Image: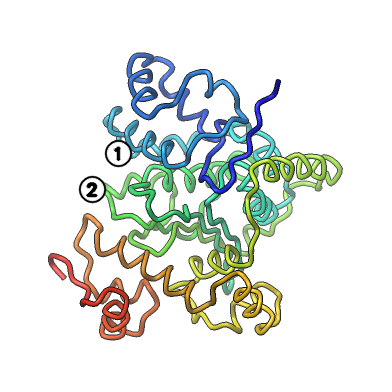
Amino acid sequence: MKQARRTGNVAFIRVAAITPLIHQFDKRQEKARVLLARHRLSQSLLEDPYAVIPLQRFIAFFEDAAEALDDPFFGAKLGSVFKPADIGPLGVLFSLSPTIKDAFERISKFVNSLQNSTSSHFVEDGDSFVWTYRIADQSIWPRRQDAEYSLAASCQLVRSNFSSAWKPDEIHFEHDAPADADTLRRIFRAPVLFRQSSNRMIMRTEEITRVYRSDNKELAAILERHIADLIGETEVGQSLTSKVTALIEHYVGRHSLTVGFLAEELGMNARTMQRQLEREGTSVRDLMQTCRQQLAANLLNAGKRLPISEIAQTLGYADSAVFGRAFKSWTGHAPSRAGK
């Protein structure tokens, strides 16, 4: 009998999304066995590409794997050789897309077929488009390997399906800069910024709207139906709260986040949006505060010393004094860290 794969509200990732990582240990069987046992990942589970495992367990395994292989850039290097088939029907759907823009719109729409508790957003920003990827659960940390893998894999998907010479305009990561950031710059062929509010890939509109092929709408529709069924199996919520949260995480520190602006982005009336959020037990103000509190905690606890003024700017505050007052209202004390 086929096992049910419903996961409720548990953060998960499908085995299909981590198969490339597992294959890296094909010639290191003993090391793989030890790591899998340490993170309670059974070999039989990994043989089913549609099986799901706890996301937190996978992220810890990924960080552990980089350390075991003595390669701090393990995730980014693995992503740089990524293939569409590595993520099953979602990868095929990406490769069928007529433009890079269409491909990212599809992957953002269906990323929850591979893992939930993930914020993936693709929006226009001036003369650029920005694809944002971020694990929503702030307790899952550190998660550098997953972030670098995900953005490098997305970049490689574009190069393997559209143009091998393609490069993004800029890459953002939420974690600290590594000792040798030039390694990442070579992989992405673009400027790389660290300690940002989210992981992002910034792409020029004129480049990603170029048509490379005709759209196979019939096959795309079949794949989308299959992927939608996978999302349904895992009961990933599509609440307004999750959508507004995704927008806040995307724009914090980059745009003035008013109720009107967020409602316009969602194609809603501002009052209607506020009423629906109230029914879900929250508000724009509450979601903004939660997002900023989580980001502030991460940045203040980061391994590298980051000035309070830079943290304030990243969180979208006018200056460090305004951030300081907000932080004190949350915690009862002023923000501080060594080397502030």
Q: Position of residue 198 (x, y in %)?
A: 43, 60
Q: Residue at x 68, y 59 (%)?
A: 209
Which residue occupies 58% across, 63% down?
242
Q: Are marks 1 and 2 in contact (CB under 8 Å)?
A: yes
- SS under mark 2: loop
Q: Is residue 232 left or right of residue 31?
A: right
Which residue corresponds to the image point at 43% horizontal and 36% vertical from the top-left? 58
Q: Decide which of 218, 297 is in the foreground and name it.
A: 297
Compute the Cα span from label 1 to label 2. 9 Å
Viewport quadrant of the N terminus:
top right
The amino acid beneath tag 1 is Pro
Q: Which mark is residue 72?
A: 1
Q: Is residue 276 above or below residue 195?
A: below
126 versus 306 height, above or below: below
Percent coordinates x, y for residue 7 in the rendering: 59, 41
Identify the image quadrant of residue 335: bottom left
x then y, percent, for residue 98: 74, 49
The quadrant holding residue 291 is bottom left
